[in-house]
């Protein structure tokens, strides 16, 4: 159908105007609903964070951060050793989980696919591996705790220790690291791989010199997400790390992380203010970690994509 | 004139699909050979045969011979082969690295560490690719910060840095504007003094302008690509032996 209407008839025609009005009202209604949903989410988030920080802020002091907890029903002392234990545990867990997770993801994305095309056995193994990674990401963390307790604490006789907790924690964050690394590798354009191979680079050189550097922002994001996960985890470490409030002096020593300490304070003492103070420290840490993800991956991406 | 690349009754299959049938062609040394033909006639697949990039695609089988300097190409390690046969892709694909590192990449992966030598290679490659004057003060800038045409010349410099004897080009100007295209065409012309160039193009005028020889590929309902005609470009364009070549070149189909 040929449209001979000029723009002015379109503007004056009551039928067209009515149609336009209905469509624009529909749009406004839906936008309002979505705007409201966004607002409610934001308010809930701010309420939780605000409540914890305001309530906990009263207990916060330099002394609170630098003195060790003394135990007891009233939750005497501060949180210094639990901060230290948290740092140790994060470091040890990542030391175990990062090479394993990044390596597994590289294998699954860069190598296994190719093998799967030629060998049906490999194809089955790969799909099992992928299914396992997906499933592991979704199971409740206490399962990792039970598994860690049974295997590391009890069978392997590591006891309640940093080592047991880090091994169990590594199982917990492995799926996160594998999946973020996989996604990071998948976003690296195949053009880079082909360009490198066509220049006479080996597959390993291509991976090491071109693909991995381009995937680094995504991989780092996965690692930092894992840091957050370990800091906020309680169930796994409740059954693998013990509950000592001393700073562990070796990887065979137990201890308690911030989150674990908070759990003990909330369950076993009446020191509500101390629990809130610990909570505030946790929340601030998580906020800082998320900010650092944005900052680091933004910076790295900018450096890779252009400029100097 | 020497033959640089040769195929004899070459066939290629993607799984059960017969993509190229009985291709026999002799590609002369230090000349530009254009591969033309409609989409799906197998030109790009044929091009990738020479640096064995088809090896990376699953389910590809071949039979028939492919020779480089009269040596069986499939007996050469693909990594070594690709150092001898450079490739420029349709979409410019510089690495997310500096201009210098892009060009130095090939020499580096083959083990060259000497920075002085690398600098020499980078400069001479960029000069050969007609990019040096535009980037010489900015070698630390990311290759991705260049314009599309500059990126493509950077990719050509990158290929030259490995000191190949053959350069394969898969529609190297397809994503570029006419001015950038002109520069690439001039460059192809200059490079043909020292390199054997095989170029796939959809642009008839381009094939006519840049190439000395032209191979016309065609396919029918079976989707199997065949070589219809191979000859000097001026003969293909003025006096083709096959009716289908003439129809294609005059724009009657494809």
Image (tube, coloured by chain):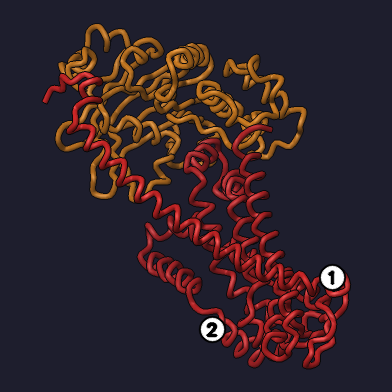
Q: Quick check: B63 left or right of A96? A: left
* The disc label shown at residue A61, or none: 1
Residue B217 position within the rendered picture, expressed as x and y whole percent measured from the top left: 26, 26
How many residues crowd around disc 1 within 10 Å: few (fewer than 14), some, or many (20 or more)? few
Picture quarter with the N terminus of chain B: top left
Between marks 2 and 1 in the image, the one whose residue lies nearer the viewer: 1
Q: Position of residue A7 (x, y in %)?
A: 25, 21
Between disc 2 and disc 1, whose residue precedes? 1
**Marks 2 and 1, how far apart in space?**
36 Å
Colour of chain A in the image:
red
Q: Write down the chain letter for disc 2.
A: A
Can you say whether A264 is above or below B197 in the image?
Answer: below
Image coordinates for residue A220, horizontal then vertical, percent:
64, 55
Q: Colour of chain B?
A: orange
Marks 2 and 1 on same chain: yes
Q: Write the residue at 43% across / 29% down.
A: B90
The chain under label 1 reads A
- Res B230 quadrant in image: top left
Residue A115 sits in which quadrant? Answer: bottom left
Q: Give the answer, above or below, for where A252 lies relative to A50.
A: below
Kindly tell me whether residue A249 is visible in this rendering.
Answer: no
Determine which of the numbered discs, if any, sits on residue A143 in the image: 2
Q: Looking at the picture, does residue B220 appear above or below residue B35?
A: below
């Amino acid at each position: 159908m040929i449209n001979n209407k000029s723009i002015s008839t379109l503007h004056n025609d009551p039928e067209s105007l009515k149609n336009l009005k209905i469509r624009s009202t529909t749009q406004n209604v839906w936008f309002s609903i979505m705007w409201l949903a966004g607002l409610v989410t934001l308010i809930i988030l701010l309420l939780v964070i605000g409540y914890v920080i305001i309530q906990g802020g009263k207990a916060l002091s330099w002394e609170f951060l630098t003195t060790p907890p003394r135990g007891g029903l009233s939750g005497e002392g501060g949180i210094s050793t639990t901060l230290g234990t948290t740092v140790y545990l994060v470091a040890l867990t990542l030391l175990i989980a990062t090479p394993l997770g990044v390596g597994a993801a590289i294998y699954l994305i860069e190598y296994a696919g190719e093998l799967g095309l030629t060998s049906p056995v490999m194809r089955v193994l790969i799909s099992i591996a992928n299914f396992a990674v997906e499933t592991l990401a979704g199971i409740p963390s206490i399962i990792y705790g039970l598994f860690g307790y049974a295997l590391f604490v009890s069978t392997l006789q590591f006891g309640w220790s940093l080592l047991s907790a880090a091994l169990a924690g590594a199982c917990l964050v492995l799926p996160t690291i594998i999946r973020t690394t996989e996604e990071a590798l998948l976003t690296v354009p195949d053009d880079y791989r082909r360009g490198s191979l066509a220049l006479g680079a080996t597959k390993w050189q291509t991976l090491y010199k071109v693909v991995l550097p381009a995937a680094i922002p995504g991989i780092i994001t996965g690692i930092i997400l894992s840091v957050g996960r370990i800091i906020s985890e309680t169930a796994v470490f409740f059954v693998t790390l013990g509950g000592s409030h001393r700073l562990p002096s070796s990887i065979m020593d137990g201890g308690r992380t911030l989150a674990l300490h908070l759990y003990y304070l909330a369950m076993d003492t009446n020191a509500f203010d101390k629990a809130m103070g610990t909570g505030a420290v946790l929340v601030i840490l998580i906020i800082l970690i998320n900010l650092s993800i944005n900052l680091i991956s933004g910076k790295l991406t900018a450096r890779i994509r252009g400029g100097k | 004139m020497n033959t640089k690349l040769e195929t004899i009754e070459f066939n290629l299959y993607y799984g059960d699909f017969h993509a190229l049938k009985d291709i026999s062609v002799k590609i002369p040394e230090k000349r530009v050979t254009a591969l033309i033909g409609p989409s799906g006639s197998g030109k790009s697949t044929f091009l990738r045969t020479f640096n064995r990039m088809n090896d990376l695609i699953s389910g590809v089988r071949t039979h028939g011979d492919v020779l480089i300097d009269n040596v069986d190409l499939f007996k050469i390690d693909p990594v070594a082969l690709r150092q001898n046969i450079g490739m420029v892709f349709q979409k410019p694909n510089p690495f997310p690295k500096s201009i210098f590192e892009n060009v130095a990449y090939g020499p580096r992966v083959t083990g060259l560490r000497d920075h002085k030598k690398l600098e020499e290679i980078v400069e001479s490659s960029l000069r050969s690719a007609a990019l040096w004057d535009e980037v010489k003060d900015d070698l630390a800038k990311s290759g991705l910060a260049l314009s599309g045409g500059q990126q493509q010349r950077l990719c050509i410099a990158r290929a030259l840095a490995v000191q190949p004897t053959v350069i394969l080009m898969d529609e190297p100007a397809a994503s570029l504007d006419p001015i950038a295209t002109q520069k690439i065409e001039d460059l192809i012309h200059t490079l043909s003094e020292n390199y054997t160039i095989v170029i796939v193009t959809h642009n008839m005028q381009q094939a006519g302008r840049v190439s000395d020889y032209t191979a016309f590929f065609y396919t029918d309902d079976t989707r199997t690509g065949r070589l219809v005609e191979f000859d000097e470009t001026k003969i293909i364009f003025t006096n083709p032996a096959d009716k289908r070549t003439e129809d294609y070149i005059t724009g009657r189909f494809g």
